[in-house]
Amino acid sequence: MAAVLAGPYSDQMRLRWPAPLEDRPFRLMWFAASTSAVGSAFVPVALAFAVFRSGGNATSLGLVLLAGTVAGLVAYIVGGVWADQMSRRGLMVAADLARMLVQAGVAAVLLTGHARIWMLVVASVINSVAWSVFQPASTGLVAQLVPDSKLQKANSLLSVTMSGALLAGPALSGLLVAASGVGWSFALDAASFAGSAAFLVAMPTLGLAERTKRRFFAELAEGWHEVTKRTWYWTNLIAHAVWNLAFCAFLVLGPVLALRRLDGAIGWGLVSTGLAAGALIGGLVAMRVSGRRPLVTGNLALMLAALPLLAFAARLPLLIVVACAVVGASGGNILNIAWTTVVQQLIPNEVLGRVRSYDYTLAYIAMPAGYAAAGPLAASFGADRVLVAAAGLIVLCPAVAIVLPSVRAITRQPDGTIVHSPRRAGKVSSAVGASSSQL
């Protein structure tokens, strides 16, 4: 038997990782992301019960979530600058350790019955700040670890991992809370961050290229310049920000209409599950399919998110609404993966953290406005009309981006690399085939 295994079949019996998991550094990062995603998927459900069991109510829960959202938005700009100045792996490890300690502390006070609302507010703020440090560093590190030809698959793998955890996590968290108490979900999350940090520590050290460090606001100004000089980038940012604002109408009015028309909480739960399943499907599609014009393909897919809004407005049956949610979320994730891949290839790595920080900040600043406006608009014009108008914006914004020459000029080459090749005076610019540091 030993002689047989040593023969020509031995190579076939070795474990072969799918690309890009063949590369050990990215494989360790994927293990880290998978570990923390599983733990974090348990928290949203557990957090609500933690607030209620600490003497709070719906307003208290809103305060906890608002504090985290505001802190995260403010910190993301700082995190973007740090991601371009420091070791990205080091920042990610520090963020994981901070969240591990915070979640372990929350678990301890919940399990001992000493939890207070202010403690949960503080924990929400620290966790959001740590996330805002982790995220831009993570985006830049993936671009360092993975060749351009494998970037879309790498981003798809990470997305599928997150989506799969979000799909199963809430249901499992509810069972864990019912069986063992709310504190154990936070303990599991703390353990997941410890595991994530351990995988990241095992990665080889990667340094950034030598560059002159300047004052904080000078660093921000350089990042802003990198954004504004790329028409394809800032136009998509505006389009996606308005898209986020419009989709908030669905997130606010959907639960209200589900209570009236779709079997209440059960109906909205199925729609939410459909959104998570759709994100997972979108990640799987993006892993296999890549268009020649990635931003055109991604923005076309993004239009599908109008379907669940129109299904609610048309008062369609629950199963059709759920199916529309699956399709819509799938399209949204296809755009997210395409966008991340394009940005990682066309933005110089030494400014990628700051550029992405503006991306996230602009996209998510629009969301509080959308949340705030949906209710009053529905009271004035009716929920169905607001959803139809929002669906119109969801289709219009990506459509405007698609027709722009600078967006259509971004193309994927046969080897998987992405280039920006604008046409001038009817001729292809000599920039075709340029490196990812070009516009």
Image (cartoon, helix red, strand yellow):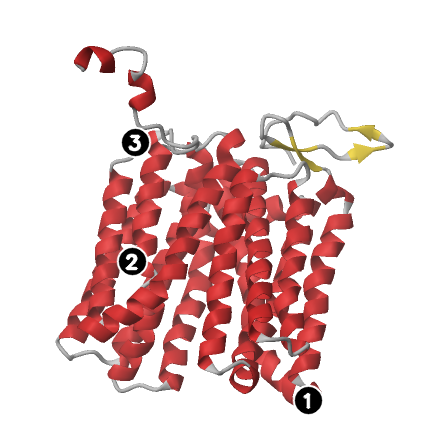
Q: Earlier in the sequence, mark 2 or mark 1?
A: 2
Q: Residues within 10 Å of mark 3 (few under 14, many from 20)?
A: few
Q: Nearer the viewer, mark 1 or mark 3?
A: 1
- The residue type indicated by label 3 comes to Pro
Q: Quadrant of the C terminus?
A: top right
Q: Residues within 10 Å of mark 2 (few under 14, many from 20)?
A: many
Residue 89 percent across, percent down from the top left: 33, 41
Q: Residue at x 28, y 80 (%)?
A: 117
- The residue type indicated by label 2 comes to Gly
Q: Is residue 62 visible?
A: yes
- The residue type indicated by label 1 comes to Ser
Nearest the viewer among 226 and 417 is 417
Q: Earlier in the sequence, mark 2 or mark 3?
A: 2
83 lies above or below 179: above
Residue 17 percent across, percent down from the top left: 37, 31
Nearest the viewer among 419 and 276 is 276
Give the alpha-carbon distance from disc 1 to disc 3, as whole Å: 58 Å
Residue designated by label 3 = 204
Q: Residue furthest right?
A: 425
363 lies above or below 134: below
Q: Residues within 10 Å of mark 1 (few under 14, many from 20)?
A: few
Residue designated by label 1 = 380
Q: Nearer the viewer, mark 2 or mark 1?
A: 2
Residue 370 percent across, percent down from the top left: 59, 73
Residue designated by label 2 = 39
Q: Residue at x 32, y 60 (%)?
A: 40
